[in-house]
Image (spheres, grey):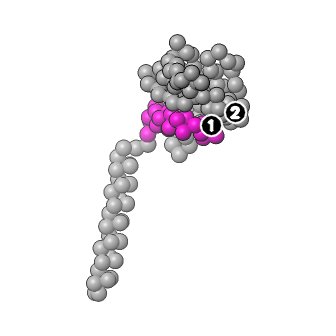
Amino acid sequence: MSIHMKTTLALATSLILMFVGSMALAWNHGPMSKVDRVAEQSANFVVDFNAKDNVALGRYYVRNKSVLKLPNAPAVSGRDAIVEAWGGGFAAGLDALVLSVDSLEEIGRNQVLENGTYELTILTPNGPIVQEGTYAVTWRVPNNPNRRPRIIFDSIDAN
C-alpha cells in the first residue's frame, strides 16, 4: 500500500470513529427535555434582543396567536405586530436586556411556563435608564425535538 493510500485510510477511519462516537454520546444523553429546550431559546432570545434584531425576535413567537404585553402599553397580538412593536422599541431606545430565570416548569403537554426578573437598559436623551421588573412567558414546545419552542404569551411588568 502506498503512503498516500495509508494516510487516506487512516483519515477515513478517524472520521468514522469520531462520527460513531458523537452519535453514541447523543444517544446516551437523549433529546433535550422541553424545559431545557426553552432555557436554550430564552438565552437565544436575549442574544437577538441585544443585537436589536426585531425580525429575529419575531421568529420566537407563534405566527398568529401570540401576545406581547409590555408595561403601560396595550397588548400586541400576532407575530407581524410584535416584530413592529420590538422595532419601534429599539428605535425609541431599548438597548440591553438581562434576564434572570426564576423558574421553568411544564404546565401542559406542550407548554412550559418561564418566570423571572429582567433588567432593561433604555437610552434616553438625558442618558441611559435601567428598568427592572418581572416577566412571564408561556412557550409552546413541539414534541418534535427538531422544531424549536415558540412564545404564545409574553407579559412584562415593570417595578
In this view of the protein, can residue 75 be seen by the observer?
yes
Indicate the position of residue 140 as horizontal and vertical percent values: 58, 31
Relative image position of residue 95 (x, y in whole percent): 55, 30
**Which residue in the structure is indicated by mark 1?**
54
Nearer to the camera, 21 or 74: 74
Q: Amino acid at mark 1?
A: Asn
Indicate whether 69 appears above or below 81: above
Q: Which residue is mark 2?
A: 84
> Relative to 100, is 2 on the left or the right?
left
Q: Residue at x 34, y 61 (%)?
A: 18
At label 2, the amino acid type is Glu
Relative height, residue 132 to residue 96 (above, below): above
Q: Give how far across and how far down residue 92 sits, in percent.
A: 64, 28
Give the magenta part as a residue range: 32-57
Q: Is residue 53 magenta?
A: yes
Q: Is residue 1 left or right of residue 61?
A: left
Assess whether mark 1 and mark 2 are in contact (beta carbons under 8 angstroms): yes
